[in-house]
Amino acid sequence: MSMDKTFDAAAAEPEIYAEWERAGAFAAGANARPGAETFAILIPPPNVTGSLHIGHALNNTLQDALIRWKRMQGFDTLWQPGQDHAGIATQMVVERKLAAEGAPSRREMGREAFTAKVWEWKAESGSTILNQLRRLGASCDWSRMAFTMSGAPGAPAGEDGNFHDAVLKVFVGLHRDGLIYRDKRLVNWDPHFETAISDLEVEQVEEKGNLWRFRYTLADGETYDHPVVREEIDGEQTTRNWTPDDDDPSAWEERNYIVVATTRPETMLGDTGVAVAADDPRYAGLIGKSVVLPLVGRRIPIVADQHADPTKGTGAVKITPAHDFNDFEVGKRAGLKLINVMTSRAEITLERNDAFLDGCAPDPEAMALEGLDRYEARKRIVALAEGQGWLDGIDAETHVVPHGDRSKVAVEPWLTDQWFVDAKALAKEALAAAHDGRTTFHPANWVKTYDHWMENIEPWCISRQLWWGHQIPVWYAPDGTFFCEATEAEAQAAADAHFGAPTALTRDPDVLDTWFSSGLWPMGTLGWPDQTPELAKYYPSSVLITGFDIIFFWVARMMMMGLHFMKDEAGAPVQPFHDVYVHALVRDEKGKKMSKSLGNVIDPLELIDEFGADAVRFTLASMAAMGRDIKLSRSRVAGYRNFATKLWNAARFGEMNECVPVPGFDPASATAPLNRWIVGETARLREVVDAGLAEYRFNDAAGALYAHVWGVFCDWYVELSKPLLMGEDEAAKAETRATLAWALDQCLVMLHPFMPYVTEKLWGQIADRPKMLIHADWPALSAEALADPAADRRIGRLIALIEAVRSVRAEMNVPPSARLPLLVLEADDALRALADGEAALISRLARIEGIETVETAPKGAVTITLEGGAVALPLAGIVDGAAEKARLEKALKKVEKDADGIARKLDNPGFLAKAPEDVVEENRERLEELRAEAARLSLAASRAAELV
RNA sequence: GGGCGCGUAGCUCAGUGGUAGAGCACUAUGUUGACAUCGUAGGGGUCGCUGGUUCGAUACCAGCCGCGCCCA
């Protein structure tokens, strides 16, 4: 049965993948040599709500390439798959689904019923991305599938893993060590999801807005003189406020108010002070006095604080400690009250707000703001300010507003009780590990990003007001005392002991940040807190492959958690991975970040449908140069699909010519120079591919494979093998068949990590094998042992000769069908041997008929100069003497220019004295070659001139 | 404002202290029994600019210009 002309990826891929799975080819330790070293990669867990985007495709292509490579080398490999429970995202998806179905809402059905719904949803829809990873060819050990919510209460059968235990153990442990604490402070509050989020989940978005200036009247009838500047503009006298940039003020104006500027008028309801710089000449005299807050009627102090910048705005800022991070700090320094005026949905709350009502005399208009959304309240307050005459002015301004990365609504700094991790304490060891060689970043410069964050780390808010997640293991007694234990029973026991009597407890309703559990990924996926054999074997993992966008979110947290909890026999902290390879961001072909809103998203699954998974993988690997973003275009993918076709057809050629692998074939035993040459080339390829993969230089490895398979094996070896395969010499034919089959096998083996499908298919098609390609032995070929310099030189010269003849033929418009004799004019021994020994190859590829040695070139012959001699093609009648002369002179000019450059170099005493000996020698040899070629060209040119 | 990175062929990008590369695109050409998802040949670059180090710089250093990303 002969092969099809192309590889049918769509049909073959699922079959091949199923075969691998049937054979258990992906299992941890599959194909491991006895006593093998381990090589483990933990997948960056995709969200359970996720679907495969091009970044995942890149990330997993690289992981799979490394895993397949090491597996073939006989390492004890583990590629640990799993998923992240994605608290907010998942809860959002399920709530939306319930709403769409007209089902009772989350709050109506209650916590237990809702989480049951989430589990149901996960069972139905949660594995989309896993199936997409399979299509990509990912060889994860699916039998070890992990999930960051496994083992949580209510988890259905099959979801009964260890993660919940791990999370609780870590929480209780960190709490016991004083590294987790409860605190009332401002957090980033997402009013849409009504939960706290961490700093990292906040996006800064630039928005057009206004800076409103309000006049706050001084209390007790106080006045002061505010400096102003009188100017004449267009013939009119104007007065404006003096600023520190001006010269001395030209006048003073008596005022009974101070002007503050704000981008958020609605927060004025919660103002508890006005800050000015201590040395601001405008306001220094007012420090210690008070203003009366408009609408609210509260007396609030004017305080000195460095937060007020005299050069910005009016130099005076209103202080709302309960609604702004900076103001919170000012308030702490100045002892100001905290008055929260918003609900969890960012609606104004005044009526039942004791903190607000205490010590104020609000206008009825203020109280009418009750229940309004923050933006509605803003409008009303501005209108009231205008109506009541305390609006000083409005300046348009763009400013940066923090938004929730999931909800896309503006985040409200909000005062609540939350749980925090003392990240600063955990960061110490995590920083050390990245600097003492325990964990190495590739490319190395990413360690700076990591450092910068670790060094400026803030307390990590880990509690979330959600239901989908690990509920915080803390129980409260009625008096507020709390007990942090892994189980309710332990908490109860602790409480009873503490109070000396049975005490009713209520559990903290909040859950933990998803990244808190993701931080345990390197341990939790291996069974921790149980001391499993896998944990002993595969922790720490070999390399983490990830995008730079989650260095903070995830890498940093795994480092902190792993180092804190994992200890070696001596009790020293053990890092979660030896290497961190940070790969590029995939952009569209114009360099834009792909996003749904821009509509420039390239769907990897569409690419796979169109070009095959191998082409998509090879494209991504080829473009994965370290430290650079990838701009992906379809044409590039099409090119690598063509590459797969090329490989396929090379195999088809082998099949047609009965090239089958010979068991026990020893590549060193080949005798024909052509065969010895391809063996050497193959050995060199193996060294380059191994070196590339070992250093995470995926593009180098892929590039070398491409150049070898297409440019060396197909273009030259296959072409040059044809005369041998179709010739009469049976011994040469047999040797060439065996060598070709061997060399092709090596290509399949080395391409397999990048193009697993087409290579596996060909592997099976070419011969019956004891093992599938996925478990084939990776070669240990050494170029030093196998490359034959004589064969390399001979084939190198052969190729140069053929190319030179073809070039002349094309330039002279010799029809491809015309066969010409080759006249050898001058030849050193090697060239002579080549002309004699490889006549069949030369004839076929250069379309030559008969090689003869002549004393002088006949009239009308075109001369070709080569290393070691010159040959000629008789083209009398075809060639125009003048054109030929011009061609040769042009070539001569170039050679002479090169020669002159080198000669100048060799004339430079500094070069001779300081350049390394071998460089000098190289240049001398090159000059000699160029001079010899120049002589041949010049001779040929003068002969051509005779024709004219 | 702080940090990181990038300017090399028309496009997308490798690369190196010692002869400038690839893929795509382009031009010409081809029914040579693996492959037109192909073959053959060809054109195309003061390696962003200016200085410095060096016998020698596209590469190392400094400054400048242009662009991108991250953090405030």
Image: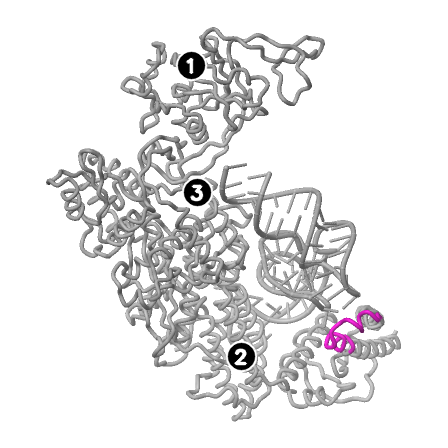
Q: Nearer the viewer, residue A723 or A339?
A: A339
Q: Nearer the viewer, residue A813 or A415?
A: A415
Q: Is residue A298 left or right of residue A511?
A: right
Point out the tag, 2 or 1, that comes first from the N-terminus.
1
> Is label 1 or label 3 in front?
1
Say above or below: A91 vs A249: below
Q: Is residue B55 left or right of residue A620?
A: right
Q: What chain is tagged by disc 3?
A: A
- Callout 1 amino acid: Leu
Q: What chain is tagged by disc 1?
A: A
Instruction: Estimate the x, y position of residue A821 in percent, counting from the top left.
Output: 72, 84
- Check the image and name the residue furthest to the top: A221
Q: Which residues are magenta?
A: A908-924
Magenta highlight on residue A894: no
Q: Nearer the viewer, residue A611 or A933?
A: A933
- Residue under numbered circle 2: A683
Point out the tag, 3 or 2, that comes first from the N-terminus.
3
Instruction: Estimate the x, y position of residue B41 in percent, counting from the top left.
Output: 68, 69
Q: Secondary structure at mark 1?
A: loop
Instruction: Estimate the x, y position of residue A819 in percent, counting from the top left.
Output: 68, 80
- Residue under numbered circle 3: A596
Q: What chain is tagged by disc 2?
A: A
- Residue under numbered circle 1: A293
Can residue A633 be spotted in the picture? no
Question: Which residue is depicted at the point 50% across and 63% down?
Answer: A640
Instruction: Estimate the x, y position of residue A499 in percent, counting from the top left.
Output: 15, 39
- The local crowd at label 3, few if under 14, some if 14 to 19, many if 20 or more residues have their Cα within 10 Å, is few
Indicate the quadrant containing the N terminus of chain A: top left, top right, bottom left or bottom right. Answer: bottom left
Indicate the quadrant containing the C terminus of chain A: top left, top right, bottom left or bottom right. Answer: bottom right
